[in-house]
Amino acid sequence: MHFVDTHAHLDDEQFDDDRANVLTRALDAGVTTVIAIGCTAASSQACVDLAASHPRVFAAVGLQPNGCAVAKPGDWDEVVRLSGHERVVALGETGLDRYWDYTPFPLQQDYFDRHLRLSQDAGLPFVVHMRDCGGDILEMLTDAGNRGPLRGVMHSYTGDAALAGACIDLGLYISFAGMVTYKKATELREVAMTIPLEKLLIETDSPYLSPHPRRGQRRNEPALVVHTAECLAETRGESLETLAAATTANAFTLFDRLQR
């Protein structure tokens, strides 16, 4: 079996002391591909550098909504430049966030729109961060969809089934992280049951959101995406082999610059 961790913050300082070992453990667990996700211009460059140094790591570049208020002049131009790198497979993470109050909402919307337009112009999929703003996300996705086809993923999904269905109708995939494994996440697992297998992805969002039974440990890492896959397979009544094959195929379909 092979797995793809479609969302990991591999540039995080928590990995500085043993990043090579983290990637070795991932490979040993069957996680043969990891997408390192940028949140700032600097972290996007770091993710590109990691991807250039590790054959099974690829990069996404973008400006995460909570950091847009402190983006420096030229940061967006740097993201656009990096998007042309051969190891970059996606834009993001981008999106909207009403939980935290770090960035004025109109500015978040401006940067989300930039990512969506660049996605459509460059042919790269986008990675959506969403927190307490499903309606706002859907409105902007719908507007973007009126301009042309959309390719993207709702990362670490925690919304309801109706929103997931609307996003799928617009051409997006739905990705689940460790939260779906938590004991009290019954409603989220019910949502996961409604996602068509051909639109399902898995991720760690590491070093955050360690899945059960590793919840509460020092950090999450790509090898642990297998626990999320096991939970989803059990929840959906599918074999782990079926879910692994489907989510891996889906990742290579959406992120079509990935190399096997």
Image (cartoon, helix red, strand yellow):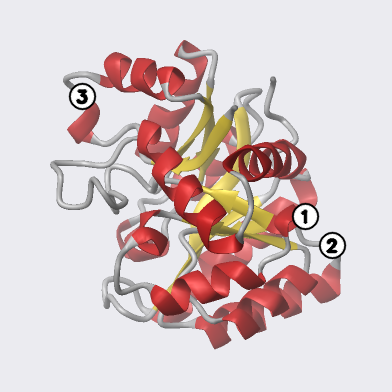
- For label 2, the SS is loop
What's the residue at 53%, 75% (across, down)? 190
Other residues around mark 3 within 10 Å, as few (<14) / some (14–19) / many (≥20): few
- Where is residue 236 shown, x and y percent of the image? 60, 62
Q: Nearer the viewer, residue 32 or 114?
A: 32
Q: Using residue 144 as the reference point, say whether residue 75 is left or right of it.
A: left
Could you tell me which secondary element the residue under label 3 belongs to?
loop
Q: Quadrant of the N terminus?
A: top right
Can residue 74 be seen in the rendering of this structure?
Answer: no
Mark whose residue sits in front, 1 or 3 = 3
Give the residue drawn at x 47%, y 14%. 54
Q: Which mark is residue 149?
A: 2
Q: Which mark is residue 16?
A: 3
Q: Mark 1: which amino acid?
A: Gln
Q: Nearer the viewer, mark 2 or mark 1?
A: 2
Q: Element under label 1?
A: helix
Distance CA(mark 2)–CA(mark 1): 7 Å
